[in-house]
Image (cartoon, rainbow, N blue to C red):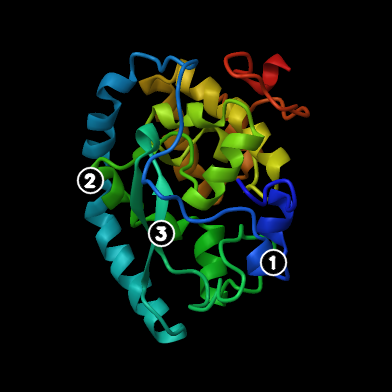
Amino acid sequence: MENVEQASLEQYVTNPETPIESRAVEPPAEESFGSFSVVSPSGYFRWKSLVSRLIAMLLLIPGLFVICILMALIRVTSKGPTIFKQKRVGLNGRVFTMYKMRSMRLDAEDGTGPAWSTKGDPRVTPLGRLLRDHHLDELPQLFNVLRGDMDLFGPRPERPEFVQVLEDRVPGYTERLRVRPGISGLAQINLPPDTDVDSVRRKLCLDLEYIDHATFWLDFRMFIATLLRLLGMPGDTVMRMMKLERKLSSCEQPEPGTCRSLNDI
């Protein structure tokens, strides 16, 4: 990629002052990414999508009511559509449209291009901050699960513009694309949102651990942990109780096929 050597991804995703012409990536010409050779997903993935779709249908019974209320609140508090659509990279590098409740201003990326959100991001609306704090902005992704684009749990899907850079900078990154992405995952419940390449490397360790060792029991524990955290139980308590916490030691850039858990580092 032409400008990768000139502009780091950290600058690209965190600095809104970076001029467009010096940005590191361009929209991909083809709607697919990655080459795969290392990770062998656990046998659970053969029927995991069916389980996710059945649970998503059940969750949408109360979820549709909540989504409608949130759509009305977004409509009266800020300009723009209530549902935000964004391209993400999924299973086997296929690009799909992911749905979210809109939590940012309509002009959030005007003049800056694609950028990761940061703590205290001024682009986020007051209501959007509340939605993000309680992860309610992710509710429409239940429809992505029904469509077969996503599962309830798995590696979090990234934007094509970022994948194009990360697959060069983080060895093994595209191994995440061997399975359907998730609304949440082992990496997401253990680590904060990505802000730079180092945070991506740390999450990759847990993503690969999940791909290798995913079971229905692990997904069930993450599901219960998510519900308990939404109900206000402290995250540390939930993680210990559900035996989901991982040692968050520094994770160096992992070699494909060698980094399976932060506990192994």
Please name the residue that numbered disc 1 is placed on. Answer: 120
The reply to whether the C-beta atoms of the residues labelled 1 and 2 are less than 8 Å apart is: no
Image location of residue 221, percent across then percent down: 45, 29
Residue 17 lies, with reference to residue 243, above or below; the image says below
Question: How dense is the environment of label 1, judged by Cα within 10 Å: few (below 14), some, or many (20 and up)?
Answer: few
Q: Which mark is residue 147?
A: 2
The image quadrant that residue 240 belongs to is top right
Which residue corresponds to the image point at 73% horizontal and 56% vertical from the top-left? 11
**Quarter occupied by residue 79:** bottom left
Q: Nearer the viewer, mark 1 or mark 3?
A: 3
* Residue 65 appears in the picture as rendered: yes
Q: Secondary structure at mark 2?
A: helix
> Would you say 25 lies left or right of 262 here?
left
Is 181 on the left-hand or right-hand side of 174?
Answer: left
Image position of 83 with respect to 178: above or below: below
Which quarter of the image is occupied by the C terminus?
A: top right
Q: Is residue 23 above or below residue 217?
A: below
The residue closer to the viewer here, 105 or 174, is: 174
Q: Is residue 231 visible?
A: no
Rendered position, 125 above or below 47: below
- Disc 3 crowd rating (10 Å Cα; few below 14, some 14-19, many 20+) is few
Binning the other alpha carbons within 10 Å of mark 2 as few (below 14), some (14 to 19) or many (20 upward) gives few
**Residue at position x 51%, y 57% in the image:** 134
State the CA–CA distance, disc 1 to disc 3. 22 Å
Could you tell which of marks 1 and 3 lies nearer the N-terminus?
A: 3
Q: Amino acid at mark 1?
A: Gly
Which of the two labelled residues, at mark 2 and mark 3, occupies the earlier sequence position?
3
Kind of residue at badge 2: Arg
